[in-house]
Amino acid sequence: MVTKQFKGSADDADLTRADSLAREIFSDVANKWALLIIEALGEGTLRFGELRNEVEGISHKMLTQNLRMLERNGLVERKVHPTVPPRVEYTLTEPGRALRITIDGLCDWTHRYLGDIEASRHRFDA
C-alpha cells in the first residue's frame, strides 16, 4: 500500500484532489465496519471477541483488517497483556474519541431521517 505523504499544515489539505492524504483517511474510516467498530469502542475497552459480538455480522477477517487500519491511523490503541493465552484489548485514542462524536452525529441523523429516507426510496422504486 502506498501512503501519500502530507507536507504542510492541515489547512493546506485539498480535499478535492484525488491524491490527497485527507481523502485516503476518509476512505479508510468511512466504511461501515470502521464506523461500527468506533461506535462499539466508544463504550470502553473491548477484547477482540467482545468487539466481534458487538459488531453483528462482521467476520474475523474484516474485524482484523479494520482494527489494523484503525490502529495504523492512530484511532485505536491495541494493548497486548503478557498472559497465556495473550489477552488483547482495543481502546479508542483521543483522535478516535473525537471521531466518535462525529459518528454519533451521523447515527442521530440516521435515526431522525430514517422514515423520510425509507419513504423516498419507496416513491423512487415505484
Image (cartoon, helix red, strand yellow):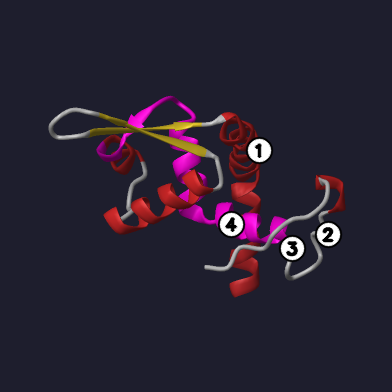
Query: Of callouts 1 and 4, which one flags the residue occurring earlier in the amino acid sequence?
Result: 1
Per the model, the C-alpha gap separating discs 2 and 4 is 34 Å
Q: Earlier in the sequence, mark 2 or mark 3?
A: 2
Dominant SS type (magenta)? helix
For the residues labelled 2 and 3, the Cα–Cα distance comes to 6 Å
Viewer-proximal residue among 19 and 63: 19
| Residue depth check, mark 2 versus mark 4: number of the one nearer the observer | 2
Mark 3 and mark 2 in contact (Cβ < 8 Å)?
yes
- The amino acid type, in three-letter code, at marker 1 is Thr
Q: Three-letter amino acid code at disc 4? A: Glu
Quarter-of-image position of residue 120: bottom right
Label 2 belongs to which residue? 14
- Name the residue carrying label 4: 118
With respect to residue 114, does 43 lie above or below?
above
Specify the label residue 102 is tagged with.
1
Residue 99: quadrant of the picture: top right
Q: Secondary structure at mark 1?
A: helix
Label 2 crowding class (10 Å Cα cut-off): few <14, some 14-19, many 20+?
A: few
Distance from Cα at disc 1 to Cα at disc 2? 20 Å
Q: Which residues are magenta?
A: 21-49
Mark in front: 1 vs 4: 1
Identify the residue under disc 3: 20
Q: Residue drawn at (54%, 31%), measured in percent from left and top?
A: 93
Structural distance between the alpha carbons of marks 4 and 3: 34 Å
Q: Residue at x 60, y 49 (%)?
A: 115
Which structural element holds mark 2?
loop
The percent position of residue 70, horizontal first and vertical second, equals: 50, 46
- Residue farthest bottom in this picture: 126
Residue 46 place in picture, x, y as percent: 35, 30
Who comes first in sequence, dot 1 or dot 3? Answer: 3
